[in-house]
Image (cartoon, rainbow, N blue to C red):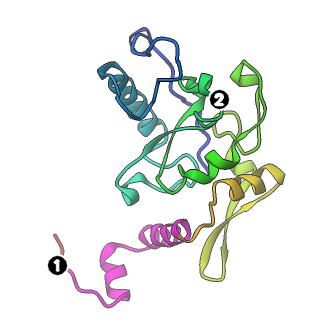
Amino acid sequence: MKIHLTDPFTYSQETAALMPAPLDDTFNWDKNIPRTLLKLKEAIRAHLLSAQNHKCIYCNLPFSIFHESHIDHFVPKSHRREFTFEAFNLVLACPPCNKYRKRQQGTLSIYDQAYRRCQFSIVHPIFEDPSAHIKYVLSKSEIIAVGNDDLGKNTVIVLDLNCEELIDYRAKEALQSAFSDTEINAKLGLIYPTL
């Protein structure tokens, strides 16, 4: 988790007008989406893709590895519905990082109606620099996330940053950064034509 999001999504007059009326129990961010909400989600995604350099806010791996990105609610919608459209609550995450465990354990430790006054149980990538709390280290043949403090340690646990899937992707990403595709193929004994 290295991305400190210094340019979060902000609502313009145009995008604010796309928000649905006050949320009620029938509203669902993911189902029966009205056209205006689709346009709003497209604007959020486009801004965050650029601001996050096409990488997951939590694990810092490129979305190209996963072939998709999810608009993630840092404080899960199921925990605090009123933060569904809070700009500081919206980030982009890869599928492994946007999974059930965060929704189950939650990210909010102290609630306040004003989002900025809330206290969080994991590193908030907009309000804090994740690299002050989490570092990546080479352990045996794996690149693992290590928390520098209690907040960092809890972030690694809640987001499951050391799951096998993310460790494998980090290794692949490190190889791709260190070697060209031709060198990797040669080291692995693979022969592919150069395009």
Residue drawn at x 36%, y 55% is 64
| Marks 1 and 2, the one that precedes in the sequence | 2
Give the CA separation, mark 1 to mark 2.
Answer: 52 Å
Q: List x then y, in percent, for residue 23.
A: 52, 18
Amino acid identity at mark 2 = Arg
Q: Which residue in the protein does label 2 denote?
A: 80
Q: List x then y, in percent, for residue 74.
A: 61, 38
The quarter of the picture where the C terminus appears is bottom left
Q: Is residue 20 above or below residue 122?
A: above
Q: Is residue 145 above or below residue 22?
A: below
Q: Which residue in the protein does label 1 denote?
A: 193
**Which one is in front in this view, the residue at disc 1 or the one at disc 2?**
2
Contact check, label 1 and label 2, Cβ < 8 Å? no
Q: Nearer the viewer, residue 41 or 141?
A: 41
Secondary structure of residue under mark 1: loop
Q: List x then y, in percent, for residue 112.
A: 77, 22
In reply to whether residue 188 is colored magenta, the answer given is yes
Instruction: Please identify the quarter of the rendering in which residue 113 is found.
Output: top right
Residue drawn at x 41%, y 69% is 176
Residue drawn at x 71%, y 58% is 157
Give the farthest residue toward the bottom: 189
Q: Is residue 189 above or below residue 138?
A: below
Amino acid identity at mark 1 = Pro
* Label 1 packing within 10 angstroms: few (<14), some (14-19), many (20+): few
Residue drawn at x 23%, y 86% is 191
* Label 2 packing within 10 angstroms: few (<14), some (14-19), many (20+): few
Direction from residue 42 to residue 153 in the image, left or right: right
In reply to whether residue 14 is colored magenta, the answer given is no
Which circle marks residue 180 in the picture? none
Q: Report the magenta residues as a range.
A: 165-193
Direction from residue 145 to residue 55 in the image, left or right: left
Q: List x then y, in percent, for residue 168.
A: 50, 72
